[in-house]
Image (spheres, rainbow, N blue to C red):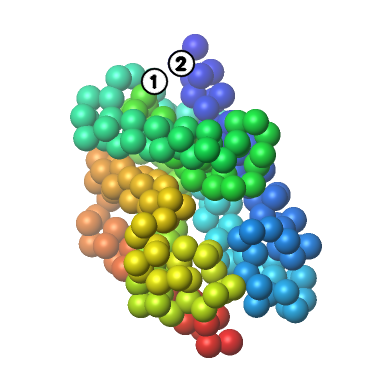
Amino acid sequence: MSKSVVRVYLLLFIAAIAVWLYNSNLDFYYGRGGNFPSFLENWPVSSRLLLLNLTSNIFYAFIALGLLIEFFNPKIEIKRQRNKFLAGLGILLVANALMVGWNNTLFSGNLYYLIDTVIYGLGFGLMFLFMSPQKTLGLSVVLWARLIEVGGFFIGYFFMPAVLSMWPEGYTLGHFARGPAFMFTNYFFWTDYITAVGSLIGVIILLKKFNFSKFWMSSFFIGAIIVGYNIARALIKA
């Protein structure tokens, strides 16, 4: 019974990521959507999709791959989380995801605004709160992909240029382009921030539990920040 419940959880997590990938690729293909950078409007479709999938969607794809590997031989057990801090992170992520989903009518069928916050909030939140993962190839792929994603995409690509007021209007999400003062008082930033930082801390706890080296965790995290920041700089100068 426990393995069946875990497989349902994994399938729903994978399906949600697949929906996100499908919709985001359609938006970039047709050049539409509130999160579509205006400077890409004149780019060839193939270049748009290549940029999207190399800077953002590649992380979703790796996480989905790790979940799929885990699906065939799940080593996640359903049990009460004894680590109170990790359980608290789970509650925070789930609550944030439900609030965002409710406020943006995601649960009424509108799969557009902040769906990624809901996916990761529920996906990682439930894992931290109700499950006891074991070290496996699939979960290792999931955790390392999320570690690099938060470092490279959220912190390096979005957050650091935003704090330095480098993003021009139309080049990225509006709350990042309008400067730090606006960013830190914006609902969209804080909902993303809670999910990004909360899931990052939980991922680090699990990686340490699985005895991964602190040196390599730090190296990959810092390296991802540097790469993400330089990709942003290159786009801003283009």
Crowd class of label 2 (few under 14; some 14 to 19; many from 20; radius 10 Å): few
x and y percentages locating residue 184 in the rendered image: 35, 60
Residue at 45%, 70% (x, y): give it. Answer: 178
Residue at 41%, 56% (x, y): give it. Answer: 186
Q: In this view of the protein, which residue sits in the foreground, 133 or 104?
A: 104
x and y percentages locating residue 9 in the rendered image: 52, 27
* Residue marked by disc 2: 2
The three-letter code of the residue at mark 1 reads Ile
x and y percentages locating residue 36 in the rendered image: 65, 64
Q: Which mark is residue 164?
A: none
Relative side of 91 to 52, left or right: left
Q: Quadrant of residue 58?
A: bottom right
Q: Would you place residue 200 above or below residue 230 in this image?
A: above
Q: In this view of the protein, which residue sits in the foreground, 229 or 127?
A: 229
Which element carries disc 1, helix, strand or loop? strand
* Residue marked by disc 1: 78
Q: Is residue 126 visible?
A: yes
Residue at 74%, 56% (x, y): give it. Answer: 26
Q: In this view of the protein, which residue sits in the foreground, 177 or 67?
A: 177
Q: Would you place residue 222 above or below residue 235 in this image?
A: above
The three-letter code of the residue at mark 2 reads Ser
Quadrant for the C terminus, please.
bottom right
Which element carries disc 2, helix, strand or loop? helix
Q: Quadrant of residue 227?
A: bottom left
Residue at 30%, 19% (x, y): give it. Answer: 80
Q: Are marks 2 and 1 in contact (CB under 8 Å)?
A: yes
Q: Would you place residue 107 above or below residue 2 in this image?
A: below
x and y percentages locating residue 159 in the rendered image: 39, 66
